[in-house]
Image: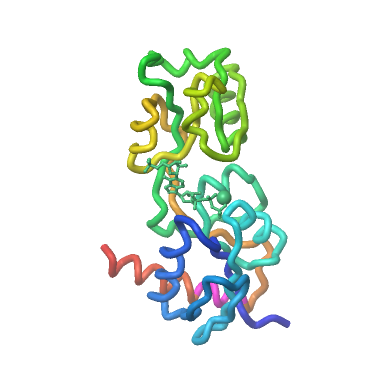
Amino acid sequence: MNKNIRIAIQKSGRLHDDSMRLLKECGIDAGNSRNQLKVTATNFPAELFFLRDDDIPEYVQDGVADIGFVGENVVLEKNKKVNTIEKLGFGKCRLSIAVPNKKKLKSVQDLAGKKIATSYPNILSAYLKKQKIKADIHTISGSVEIAPKIGLADAICDLVSSGNTLFSNELVETETILQSEAVIISTPGLAAPQQQLLQKLLFRIQSVKRSRN
Ligand code: PRT
Ligand code: ZN
């Protein structure tokens, strides 16, 4: 039986460094692990798996990893059976609808019948449904911000942090759909030894968070 807790972390990208720093501050060291897919921590019974962030909810749902550090935006979009248990205080951003600044929409209702490009079709369609707006969602995996300029869409729905990307693409935010940050998710049927390790880790994370404030 596995005595370690298996933790899924983003392999590279915006959440990698902050995730590793947090683990380190919790006393969990993984050495120089960047190019490996899996490492065993030296001073805590943990294994770290380095994955694409999009894959983390499914790995955690299926119990391949016990817990994962991932953006709440990804958790909600993927809609897997996982428990969200702790906010981590980094990776903060918002998911917003934006339109070309020359075509300022007066209200969200003006999106009716329009084409919206996004990498978050599930979150966006749930939002539009709630607002009773029928719009055409065009799913693309990257460079969403250029979609209006090249005539692919009338509006976009994408993550925003500083707002610089929207600004340089002459887009203006009209609605914020979701505020997001990195969270810990866990597999629904976590075994008792891993549950204990998770409690230990959460205790350390909470004290790191308190000391940062
Ligand atoms: O390779 P992998 O699939 O693992 O990574 P990825 O490229 O899908 O994701 P990555 O590393 O870009 O982002 C990982 C997570 O960081 C996201 O899921 C969010 O939870 C969080 N995060 C925080 C952000 C941003 N801020 C952010 N600004 N993710 C993306 N952006 C992008 C946004 O899509 C837009 O293109 O940055 C641009 C806007 O930034 P500003 O500062 O110009 O507004
Ligand atoms: Zn991704």
Which of the 4 quarters of the picture holds residue 120? top right
Q: Is residue 211 within the magenta segment?
A: no
Q: Is residue 43 above or below residue 196?
A: below
- The spot of residue 24 in percent (x, y) is 42, 76
The structure's colour scheme is rainbow
Q: Main secondary structure of the magenta part?
A: helix
| Residue 126 on image: x %, y % | 59, 30
Judged from this view, the residue extending furthest toward the front is 150
On whether residue 196 falls in the magenta region, the answer is yes
Residue 204, image quadrant: bottom left
- Residue lying at the far left in this picture: please name it: 213
- In the rendered image, residue 161, in percent from the top left (x then y), is placed at 37, 43
- Count the marks: how many? 0
What residue lies at 44% left-to-right and 56% top-to-bottom? 87
Instruction: Look at the image and tell me in which quarter the N terminus lies.
Output: bottom right
| Residue plotted at (49% across, 78% down) | 32
In the image, residue 100 above or below residue 169: above
Q: Residue at x 54, y 61 (%)?
A: 10
Query: 93 or 146: nearer the eye?
Result: 146
Task: State the extent of the magenta-drawn residues as a range.
Answer: 194-199
Q: Is residue 166 above or below residue 108?
A: below
Q: Residue at x 55, y 40 (%)?
A: 142
Q: Name the one closer to the observer, 51 or 23.
A: 51
State the image quarter where residue 195 is shown.
Answer: bottom right
Question: Which quadrant of the rendered structure holds the C terminus?
Answer: bottom left
Name the spot of residue 137 as percent of width and height, x first: 61, 25
- Position of 120 with respect to 58 (left or right) is left
Above or below residue 92? Residue 66 is below
Horizontally, is 23 left or right of 6 in the view? left
